[in-house]
């Protein structure tokens, strides 16, 4: 930490801190040592958490690639951005992290997978679809322009660049090159060291390789985890394909941590590590086909919960944050940590007041009141759903008559899932039709309707499960 940075507030040096987002794809929270994985996959991340902040209960807004990425770029819910499923472009005029940092004088860069330019391209992304990033080396759908040892990224002019070696290593090398010698397109010279950078580094790992439904770890890494530790939910559920794929998945996670170590070393070498806010998180988790016929798109923590770590000036060391945190809370947190104004369109709340010993009231983003006691999540593609994750309960309602691909929302939902996370943390027993939980459901319906409205959607009606008829309508909430 720099001498002029305070552990109880944003950086106060004359130069704003650098900001680096290390963003993985489809990484469960329990792949990390800080969440109990015994395989030693993430020593670098665990060390950053010990020096910074572990957001212990961090959840995506939507367990699908494009919607979650849209939320992390904008601080808005997927239905607010309009990116409620894959294949939809982020609206070009949406306030974004890159635009906010650029307007504050930052050199902005994006490297890796984008997935927010719609279906019209798998590779180059038009400048108007880049949400304000200047330096650009990415592919809209990296899963289709690359393989484990064949990586193609496209620069700001749309020209392809091929990289040798393992894909995660290639992205890490490109990030280090940006940190060391990043070009400022506006000024045409090497980035001034006195000008901070905002770099969003977006990996495909540990997502499966779509072309062959495999988790291609670096050569030899799959063998290291041939007898893997198995998360309790996967072991209890059986089925799925985790037995086949966990070794490769864990090998990919291990290599990501090594790439993170290379980037941390590069920042240390430049004397900028303690001047850099680092955010590590993922877009969603992975249930290995145990909940439905693919990997995510479910209401369960295996899909929703992700590892999230912050380190840097203004982020007190060794904190394990217990509050429930949504992806929409991370963009305002990054902006406030850099003392950059938070756009009023952002729907999340900065975590910084929680780190200062407060209750989240002074969020600095127009929000009043204590920190919410639940996170709202949305489900698309598999079903149209809305749900809450509280300390004890997982509750979700779905729209049986909605078109899961084309309908962003519904007017009417029905109770579909209820799990008691205290007695059933692996979410094995759905209690939604049990009459003993009628009072719990009534309260959770009320809370869900309120959070749906607060997120900017019209007020829906939520009816009880058909085996336990009771309704919450517009005039009863």
Image (cartoon, rainbow, N blue to C red):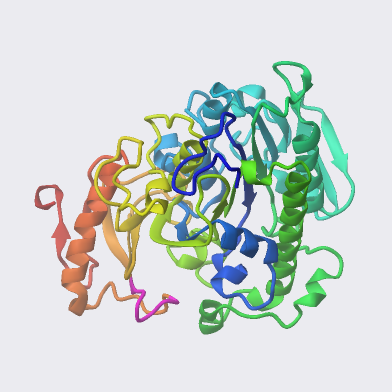
* Residue 321, quarter of picture: bottom left
Identity of the residue furthest to the front in this view: 3
Q: Is residue 257 left or right of residue 319?
A: right
Q: Residue at x 69, y 61 (%)?
A: 44
Instruction: Mark yes or no: residue 21 visible.
Output: yes
Q: Is residue 434 magenta?
A: no
Identity of the residue furthest to the top in this view: 187
Q: Is residue 46 above or below residue 273?
A: below
Q: Is residue 116 above or below residue 235?
A: above
Front-most of residues 182 and 23? 182
Front-most of residues 344 and 113? 344
- The spot of residue 437 in percent (x, y) is 21, 75
* Residue 253, quarter of picture: bottom right
- The spot of residue 33 in percent (x, y) is 61, 71
Instruction: Mark yes or no: residue 384 visible.
Output: no
Q: Residue at x 61, y 33 (%)?
A: 117
Q: Is residue 379 above or below residue 430?
A: above
Front-most of residues 149 and 89? 149
- Counting labels gives 0
* Residue 211, quarter of picture: bottom right
Magenta region: which residues?
Answer: 419-426
Secondary structure mostly seen in magenta is: loop
Q: Is residue 408 left or right of residue 7?
A: left
Front-most of residues 424 and 412? 424
Q: Is residue 343 left or right of residue 433?
A: right
- The spot of residue 37 in percent (x, y) is 61, 75
- The spot of residue 232 in percent (x, y) is 53, 81
Identity of the residue furthest to the left in this view: 475
């Amino acid at each position: 930490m720099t001498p002029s940075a305070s552990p109880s507030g944003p950086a106060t040096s004359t130069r704003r801190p650098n900001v680096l987002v290390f963003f993985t794809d489809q990484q469960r929270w329990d792949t990390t040592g800080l969440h109990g994985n015994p395989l030693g996959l993430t020593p670098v991340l665990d060390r950053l958490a010990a020096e910074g902040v572990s957001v212990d209960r961090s959840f995506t807004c939507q367990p699908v690639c494009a919607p979650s990425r849209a939320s992390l770029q904008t601080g808005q819910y997927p239905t607010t951005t309009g990116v409620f499923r894959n294949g939809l472009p982020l609206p070009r005029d949406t306030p974004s992290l890159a635009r906010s940092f650029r307007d504050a004088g930052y050199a902005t860069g994006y490297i890796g997978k984008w997935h927010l330019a719609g279906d019209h391209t798998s590779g180059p992304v038009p400048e108007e679809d880049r949400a304000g990033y200047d330096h650009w080396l990415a592919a809209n759908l990296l899963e289709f322009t690359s393989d484990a040892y064949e990586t193609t990224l496209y620069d700001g002019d749309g020209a392809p660049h091929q990289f040798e070696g393992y894909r995660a290593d290639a992205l890490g090398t490109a990030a280090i090159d940006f940190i060391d010698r990043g070009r400022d397109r506006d000024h045409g010279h090497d980035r001034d060291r006195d000008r901070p950078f905002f770099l969003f580094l977006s990996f495909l790992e540990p997502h499966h390789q779509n072309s062959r439904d495999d988790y291609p770890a670096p050569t030899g890494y799959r063998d290291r985890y041939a007898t893997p530790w198995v998360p309790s939910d996967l072991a209890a559920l059986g089925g799925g394909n985790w037995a086949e794929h966990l070794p490769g998945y864990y090998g990919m996670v291990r290599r990501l941590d090594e790439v993170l170590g290379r980037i941390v070393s590069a920042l240390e070498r430049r004397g900028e590590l303690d001047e850099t806010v680092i955010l590590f998180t993922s877009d969603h988790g992975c249930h290995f086909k145990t909940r439905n016929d693919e990997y995510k798109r479910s209401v369960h923590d295996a899909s929703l919960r992700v590892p999230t770590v912050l380190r840097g000036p203004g982020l007190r060391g060794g904190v394990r944050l217990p509050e429930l945190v949504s992806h929409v809370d991370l963009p305002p947190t990054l902006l406030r940590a850099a003392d950059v104004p938070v756009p009023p369109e952002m729907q999340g709340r900065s975590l910084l007041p929680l780190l200062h010993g407060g209750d989240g009231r002074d969020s600095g983003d127009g929000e009043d009141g204590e920190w919410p006691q639940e996170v709202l999540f949305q489900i698309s593609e598999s079903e149209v759903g809305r749900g809450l994750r509280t300390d004890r309960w997982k509750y979700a309602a779905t729209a049986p008559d909605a078109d899961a691909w084309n309908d962003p929302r519904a007017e009417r939902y029905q109770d579909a899932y209820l799990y008691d996370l205290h007695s059933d943390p692996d979410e094995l027993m759905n209690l939604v039709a049990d009459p003993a939980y009628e009072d719990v459901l009534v309260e959770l319906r009320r809370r869900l309707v309120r959070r749906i409205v607060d997120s900017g959607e019209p007020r829906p009606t939520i009816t009880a499960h058909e085996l336990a008829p009771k309704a919450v309508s517009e005039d009863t909430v």
